[in-house]
């Protein structure tokens, strides 16, 4: 659910405009399924400018803490977000040279008359979240069946006797 922060990306960059604020994590709907809880907020800042290649660009800065789920113990992990993305605006992605496409040090974004900043922030968060977050050391979750180890094949011994 977008919160209505929309800019004209090209004019925003050319005028060296800036925009900053706080976004509640609960409002980042595309990110919520990757989180343990939705408490808190992220601070953001978007600054426009013109880059060294005479292309308009946007600098996106995000700071805050997200609570992601540990893949080992299923408890929350505080994941610190300190994101800095420099996005060069292009009229058409087909205008990029093969060299520019292969250059991993630069990111490109199609120039848009109506760029949704919240959607852009969600995209950047999704791209930067760890795929399988884990604590450095943690125990497996409790199953509630005691501490004995149960083999998944133990049920087969009962089946084997009935089949004869």
Image (spheres, grey):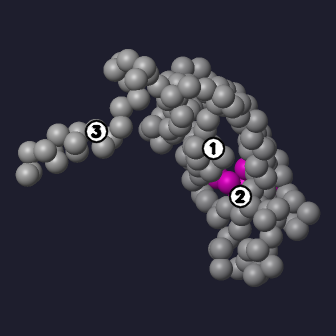
The local crowd at label 1, few if under 14, some if 14 to 19, many if 20 or more residues have their Cα within 10 Å, is few
Q: Mark 2 points at which residue?
A: 10
Q: Mark 1 points at which residue?
A: 130
The local crowd at label 3, few if under 14, some if 14 to 19, many if 20 or more residues have their Cα within 10 Å, is few
Quarter-of-image position of residue 104: bottom right
Q: Which residue sits at x=78%, y=56%?
A: 57
Q: Mark 3 points at which residue?
A: 154
Work out how far the residue at label 2 is from the one at label 1, CA to CA, in angstroms.
31 Å
Over which residues does the magenta segment extend? 8-15
The local crowd at label 2, few if under 14, some if 14 to 19, many if 20 or more residues have their Cα within 10 Å, is many
Work out how far the residue at label 3 is from the one at label 2, CA to CA, in angstroms.
65 Å
Q: Where is residue 149 in the image (x, y as percent from the top left)?
A: 41, 29
Side (left or right) of 134 relative to 141: right
Q: Position of residue 150 (x, y in %)?
A: 36, 32
Work out how far the residue at label 3 is from the one at label 1, CA to CA, in angstroms.
36 Å
Q: Which residue sits at x=62%, y=50%?
A: 127
Side (left or right) of 4 relative to 17: left
Side (left or right) of 40 relative to 106: left
Is 116 a magenta residue? no
Q: Where is residue 3 in the image (x, y as percent from the top left)?
A: 51, 35
Labels 2 and 1: the sequence-earlier one: 2
Of tags 3 and 2, the one toward the viewer is 3
């Amino acid at each position: 659910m977008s919160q209505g922060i929309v800019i004209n990306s090209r004019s925003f960059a050319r005028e060296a405009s800036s925009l900053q604020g706080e976004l509640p994590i609960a409002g980042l709907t595309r990110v919520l399924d990757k989180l343990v809880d939705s408490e808190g907020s992220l601070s953001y800042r978007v600054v426009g400018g013109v880059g060294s290649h005479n292309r308009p660009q946007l600098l996106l800065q995000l700071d805050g803490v997200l609570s992601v789920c540990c893949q080992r113990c299923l408890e929350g992990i505080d994941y610190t977000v300190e994101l800095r993305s420099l996005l060069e605006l292009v009229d058409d992605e087909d205008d990029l040279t093969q060299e520019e496409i292969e250059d991993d040090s630069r990111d490109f974004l199609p120039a848009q008359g109506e760029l949704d900043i919240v959607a852009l922030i969600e995209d950047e968060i999704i791209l930067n979240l760890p795929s399988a977050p884990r604590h450095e050391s943690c125990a497996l979750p409790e199953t509630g069946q005691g501490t004995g180890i149960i083999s998944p094949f133990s049920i087969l011994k009962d089946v084997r006797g009935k089949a004869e």
